[in-house]
């Protein structure tokens, strides 16, 4: 938000300041700006750029599906003990609904635990993940891997990552790492590779609010062959993050031909419809706000 204040001092400082403000406003009026870098880390597969370092993950045992659901307690520290409290909130029902109130003829996925829902095409595939591991350095010294894993499961009793796949496109909704998303993975855009990257920012309207996405097109190194397109929406309501992506090539490992421009545009439009249907709801999970400083 911009706050303007006017005055009538004719000093050179004010004149120069007005010139600088005018230049800034002119730049902000552009719909988006693009830039190419010589090389940058990027994805090798359909879900492939990393925006943060991936911590080593412990290998946990299978989840105990009979355990009760619970809201988030303060994150454990090195002083935690084996007698950590286990909350008793009933497990949420998180299942796709047959009919959708968002897009006519589509299905609706609802995550009551994290507080959101969205529509998706019937032919799309939904995959969800709960707690799958944790950074090894985070485990309290007086707890075993199994004990700490069970403790995390008692807190994060819902889907932390939801991955919707549509043809060669995807929409991944996840909890921010600092709010607990680091316990579920791999999820979203990960991995590195050598690409020429064209980057810009683009606005998305989600549940009536405008959010700015970091966008990128990935070209095969030292060529003009476009291979991937990604959008990263960070720090949404309920401490959520959304990753959006399209692969311009056929399904990895298949004999499918590269997609035509019309096919790519159709997939892009479908993914935008999914994002346009996104709604925030009341979450069962409670957590301290993320410190973005």
Image (cartoon, rainbow, N blue to C red):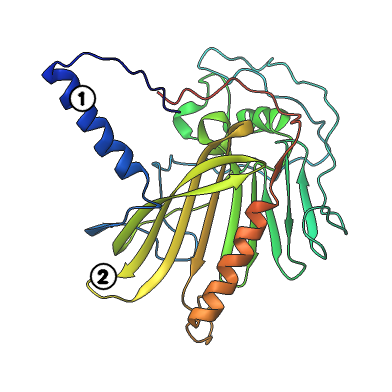
| Neighbour tally class for label 1: few under 14, some 14-19, many 20 plus, Cα within 10 Å | few
Residue 193 located left or right of residue 59? left
The label number, if any, that marks residue 148 in the structure image: none
C-alpha gap between disc 2 and disc 1: 42 Å
Task: Using the image as rendered, state which of residue 90 and residue 166 is in the foreground.
Answer: 166
Residue 134 appears in the picture as rendered: no
Whole-percent x, y for residue 50 in the image: 41, 49
Q: What residue sits 77% from the left and 26% below the top?
A: 70
Horizontal side, residue 291 vs residue 70: left or right: left
Q: Nearer the viewer, residue 53 or 17?
A: 17
Q: Residue at x 53, y 17 (%)?
A: 77
Question: Which residue is labeled 2 in the image?
Answer: 221
Q: How many marks?
A: 2
In the structure shown, which secondary structural element does the residue marked by tag 2 occupy? Answer: loop
210 lies above or below 84: below
The residue under label 1 is: 17
What residue do we see at 82% from left, 31% from top? 68
């Amino acid at each position: 938000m911009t706050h303007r204040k006017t005055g009538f001092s004719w000093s050179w400082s004010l004149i120069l300041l007005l010139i600088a403000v005018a230049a800034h406003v002119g730049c902000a009026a552009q719909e988006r700006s693009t830039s190419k870098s010589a090389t940058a880390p990027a994805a090798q597969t359909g879900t492939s750029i990393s925006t943060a370092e991936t911590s080593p993950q412990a290998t946990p045992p299978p989840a105990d599906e009979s355990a009760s659901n619970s809201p988030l307690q303060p994150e454990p520290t090195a002083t935690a003990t084996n007698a950590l409290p286990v909350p008793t909130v009933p497990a949420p029902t998180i299942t796709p609904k047959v009919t959708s109130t968002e897009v006519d003829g589509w299905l609706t996925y609802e995550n009551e635990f994290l507080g959101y829902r969205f529509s998706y095409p019937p032919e799309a595939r939904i995959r969800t993940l709960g707690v799958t591991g944790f950074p090894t350095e985070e485990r309290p010294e007086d707890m075993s891997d199994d004990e700490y894993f069970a403790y995390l499961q008692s807190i994060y009793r819902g889907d932390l990552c939801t991955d919707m796949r549509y043809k060669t496109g995807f929409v991944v909704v996840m909890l921010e790492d600092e709010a607990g998303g680091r316990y579920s993975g791999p999820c979203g855009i990960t991995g590195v590779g050598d690409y020429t990257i064209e980057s810009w920012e683009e606005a998305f309207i989600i549940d009536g609010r405008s959010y700015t996405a970091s966008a990128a097109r990935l070209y095969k190194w030292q060529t003009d062959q476009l291979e991937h397109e990604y959008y990263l929406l960070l720090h949404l309501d309920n401490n959520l993050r959304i990753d959006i992506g399209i692969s311009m090539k056929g399904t990895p490992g298949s004999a499918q031909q590269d997609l035509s421009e019309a096919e790519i545009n159709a997939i892009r439009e479908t993914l935008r419809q999914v994002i346009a249907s996104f709604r925030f709801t009341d979450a069962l999970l409670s957590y301290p706000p993320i410190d973005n400083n």
